[in-house]
Amino acid sequence: MTSYIPHLTLPSFIFEKSAVSVLLPVALGTAVGYSTRPKETQKTYLALRQPPLRPPPWVFGPVWTLLYGAMGYAAFRAWSTAMDSFDAKKVLLAKQGATLYTIQLGLNLIWMPLFFSLKRPIAATVDIVALTGVTGYLAYIWGQVDEVAAWTLVPYLGWLSFATYLSAGCGYLNNWDFESKERSTAGKPKDTNKFVDEKRE
């Protein structure tokens, strides 16, 4: 059972306004994406051996934008449903969920810097495993407040599971060492349409 921790929870006004609740994670996710320099991120992605089913780099931006918006709507929905119900149990669950939501958002936002900027695949994989667990528990908590809020998180959970597979698979295939992989490909002709583990035609 989690607790409501005000100092680890976003301000309540964020959950009270649908536009703010939806746009905040989208804005934060976009800011983190640009702060990690998209060209460098793509360079790292293309330099690494990838597990099967890895999507092309352009897929991630649109998918994450939709998922950030969905998680923001789920937060608004759970909070507003609880506060309008005057049910003490639902209010408490919504507040506990708000703490979990804030924690998962933080875990979400640090994954990209860990994986791409710092090139720490082990730390990034531990982070995303924790993120998936926290989000799953969040869906359970908010499901007791509003089923729609919980179901809105299901696509996010599905993508996190897939991203966990990609993170762990990529780390394993590259011996959990991204630095040496980039050094080994330095100086080679650029080919943004191929992965280093694919044969050139």
Image: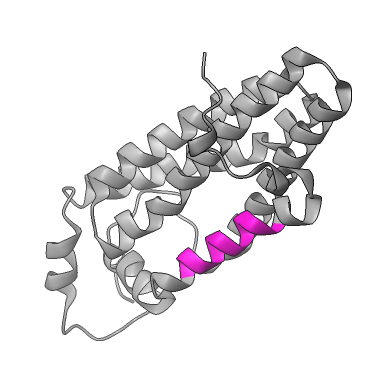
163 or 38: nearer the viewer: 38
Q: Is residue 82 above or below residue 166?
A: above
Give the quarter of the image for residue 187: bottom left
Give the quarter of the image for residue 90: top right
Instruction: Looking at this view, name the residue that lies furthest to the front.
Output: 7
Q: Is residue 91 above or below residue 110?
A: above
Q: Position of residue 41 (x, y in %)?
A: 37, 70
Quadrant in which the C terminus appears: bottom left
Q: Residue at x 49, y 29 (%)?
A: 134
182 or 195: nearer the viewer: 182
Relative side of 28 to 75, left or right? left
Magenta span contains residue 24:
yes
Q: Residue at x 51, y 29 (%)?
A: 5
Relative side of 23 to 191, left or right? right
Relative side of 32 to 75, left or right? left
Q: Position of residue 130 (x, y in %)?
A: 40, 33
136 or 80: nearer the viewer: 80
Q: Residue at x 42, y 71 (%)?
A: 35
